[in-house]
Amino acid sequence: GRSIHFEPLFPGEISYSRSESFWLARGGVAEQHSSQPLSALWQVLPEDVRLSPHVYLAANSLQGPWWILGWPERVPEADEVLPPEPPAYRVLTGVVDGFGLSLAFHREAAGELAGEITRVTDGAGRRFHLALTTQAQRAEAFRKQRATSLSSPASPRSVSSSQVFPDTLPAGTEYGV
């Protein structure tokens, strides 16, 4: 990847890289002055993000989106003195578009997927779990399901095909109703 270096920012400060056409901002203030080109976009951010001086934000357009940069969630060691010092780098922890719609990314703290995004929460509070599977794993699961459904004596037609193509529509779904 590439690295773009900015001077350290004070809470609420915004800096622009002309060579990269890229804005970097630091949280820590409720609102930006109206002379700041990103002041309208700043206001769509959730209040906790705007007020946190520990959050950095990036945008490449005055219309958004904001990329929220923080540090990954992690489980401290048993003998670790709290609070731990944050790392010098930041990772993508969320996205907020120009309308204020947001996604928060949650990374696995430990185990085989440590540091990887495995869950997403949208602005309405819905949570999504992400699971990585390979094409070979999906093909094997389909073969097993297909073999099981074809060997079932309950129906001349396989269960999987009857779920995809039902004989009748559910109540209230007929045309014109």
Image: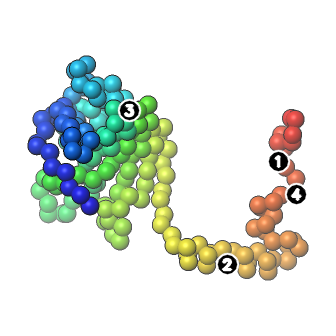
155 or 27: nearer the eye? 27
Residue tagged 3: 63
Residue tagged 2: 143
Residue ranking furthest to the front: 19
Earlier sequence position, callout 3 versus callout 4: 3
Task: Give me the C-alpha separation between circle 4 and circle 1.
Answer: 10 Å
Say which of marks 1 and 2 sits in front. 2
| Mark number displayed over residue 170 | 1
| Contact? badges 2 and 4 (CB < 8 Å) | no
| Contact? badges 2 and 3 (CB < 8 Å) | no
Earlier sequence position, callout 2 versus callout 4: 2
Q: Position of residue 165 (x, y in %)?
A: 81, 60
Q: Quadrant of residue 117?
A: bottom left
Residue type, numbered disc 4? Asp
- Other-residue count near label 1 (Cα within 10 Å), few / some / many at <14 / 14–19 / ≥20: few
Residue name at image x 36 percent, y 67 percent: 113
Residue type, numbered disc 2? Arg
User: Is 121 left, or right, of 158 in this rendering?
Assistant: left
